[in-house]
Structures are given as C-alpha cells and as structure tokens.
C-alpha cells in the first residue's frame, strides 16, 4: 500500500513539473511575441521618421536619376544621328572621287576635315591629301607631310602619312632625298617596311642605281612576311636590275 502511494505521489509530482514547464514555454513564447511586436513598432517609427526627414531628398535623387538617363539617351541619339550624317557625307566624297569628280570630292573632304568629329576628321584629312595628290603630287605630298608632323596622331598614322608622301615624291625628288624620308620605315621591325622598300627600290631603279635597287628588292624577297603579290612584282623589278642600264646608240 505504501509503495502504491509513493508511485502516485511521484506521478503527481511529474505532472506538476510538466505543467510548470508547459506554462513556462507558453510564457516565453508570449514574451517573444511581445518583444517582436515592440521591435517592429520601433522599426516602423524609425522608418517613418527617416522618410519624414529625407523623403524629399530621396524623391529628388530619383527624379535626377531619371532625368540623367533620359538625357544620356537623348545625347546618344543625337550623336548617332550626327555620325550617320557625317558618314553619308564621307561616302558622297568617295563616290565623287570614284566618278572622277575631284573638285566636288575635295570640297566635301575639306568641310569634313574642318568640322567632323575626331575620327571622321582624321579620315577626311587623309582622303583629302590623297585626292589632292591625284591632281598635284607635290601638293598632295605636302598635305601628307602635315599629317606626318601632327603630334596628336598615333605614330602608326604618322608613319603611313610619311610613306604616302614618299610615294608621291618618287617622280619628283632625287633618290637621296627620298631615301632620307623612307629608310627609317624600311627597318626589319618596321610595320610598313614592305611598301617602303618597294618604293625605295623603284626610286633607285629610276635613278639607275641598280645596286641600291637590288638591295631593296632582295630585302623584300628574303623577308618571309612579304606579301606574295609584292614578291611577284619584285621579281619583275629584279629582272630589270639584272639587265643593268640600257645603252642607247646613235
């Protein structure tokens, strides 16, 4: 009987502990809900205070961002339209040149060289020098000289201008003068060495300097990077070099 009573007491005590633990858990959950509600309320109050203080500033920044994007898109559209217009004018100049209407081509190119955006302006200057060289090689060479001496251009563009000036002067100046101008471009590392060597060889050949001509043409033949078409031309030049000067008899 005493054992049964003890068991009943222990069971009752265990129930009371479970009940107490359950009640404690309910209490903690209730407290947690209260703290969470308080935290959310505090955050809402802070957000409201922040918006009240800085709301107009944020709206202003948003409006500025929208206006900036719209302005950027408008500027891009204008630039694109201007670029298309300049491109059309350049194409008109090239067409005039192909149609042998040099005066009209030069007029358009002068306009573009003076007023076009930087990239188109440089193209127009080169094309204008080339167009000028068609009717007046000396004037065209001078125009290319101006490009070669323009420090605002990339070095490769200046070297191209120097080469083009030399090409126009093959029939105008002594070989020694042309050699001074083009020999720096004919070095083994020169990007434009193939064309520079060819025109130096032609100039030497015209001056009956066959040894110099053969040296320039041999440099083209022995360079593994020389273009195949140029090699074929040089073979013809070398035939003339091997033939030597032509003797005329009265």
Image: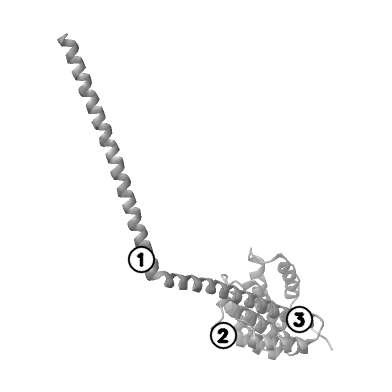
Q: Are marks 3 and 1 in contact (CB under 8 Å)?
A: no
Mark 3 Cα within 10 Å, few/some/many (few <14, many 20+)? some
- How far is the residue under mark 1 from the one under mark 2? 62 Å
- Check residue 167 in the rendering and tell me which mark sits there, or answer none: none
Q: Residue at x 46, y 71 (%)?
A: 59
Residue corresponding to mark 1: 49
The image quarter containing residue 179 is: bottom right
Q: Are marks 1 and 2 in contact (CB under 8 Å)?
A: no
Q: Confirm whether residue 200 shows in the render.
A: no
Mark 1 Cα within 10 Å, few/some/many (few <14, many 20+)? few
Residue corresponding to mark 2: 150
Q: Earlier in the sequence, mark 3 or mark 1?
A: 1
Measuring from the top left, give residue 234's x and y in whole percent: 72, 71
Residue corresponding to mark 3: 92
Q: Residue at x 61, y 88 (%)?
A: 146
The image quarter containing residue 192 is: bottom right
Query: At numbered mark 2, what does the secondary structure look like: helix, strand or loop?
Result: loop
Is residue 97 or residue 45 the one in the foreground? 45
Q: Earlier in the sequence, mark 1 or mark 2?
A: 1
- Which circle, 1 or 2, is nearer the viewer? 1
């Amino acid at each position: 009987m005493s054992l049964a009573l003890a068991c009943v007491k222990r069971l009752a005590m265990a129930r009371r502990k479970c009940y107490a633990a359950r009640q404690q858990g309910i209490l903690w959950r209730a407290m947690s809900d209260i703290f969470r509600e308080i935290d959310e309320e505090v955050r809402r109050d802070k957000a409201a205070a922040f918006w009240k203080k800085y709301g107009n500033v944020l709206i202003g920044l948003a409006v500025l961002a929208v206006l900036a994007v719209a302005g950027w898109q408008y500027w891009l559209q204008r630039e694109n339209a201007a670029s298309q217009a300049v491109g059309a004018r350049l194409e008109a100049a090239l067409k005039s040149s192909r149609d042998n209407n040099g005066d009209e081509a030069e007029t358009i190119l002068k306009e573009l060289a003076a007023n076009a955006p930087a990239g188109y302006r440089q193209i127009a200057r080169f094309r204008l020098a080339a167009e000028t060289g068609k009717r007046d090689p000396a004037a065209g060479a001078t125009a290319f000289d101006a490009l070669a001496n323009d420090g605002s251009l990339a070095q490769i563009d200046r070297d191209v201008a120097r080469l083009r000036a030399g090409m126009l002067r093959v029939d105008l100046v002594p070989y020694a003068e042309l050699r001074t101008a083009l020999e720096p471009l004919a070095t083994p590392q020169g990007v434009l060495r193939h064309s520079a060597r060819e025109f130096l060889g032609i100039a030497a050949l015209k001056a009956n300097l066959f040894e110099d001509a053969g040296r320039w043409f041999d440099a083209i033949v022995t360079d593994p990077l020389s273009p195949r078409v140029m090699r074929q031309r040089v073979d013809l030049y070398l035939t003339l070099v091997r033939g030597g000067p032509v003797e005329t008899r009265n």
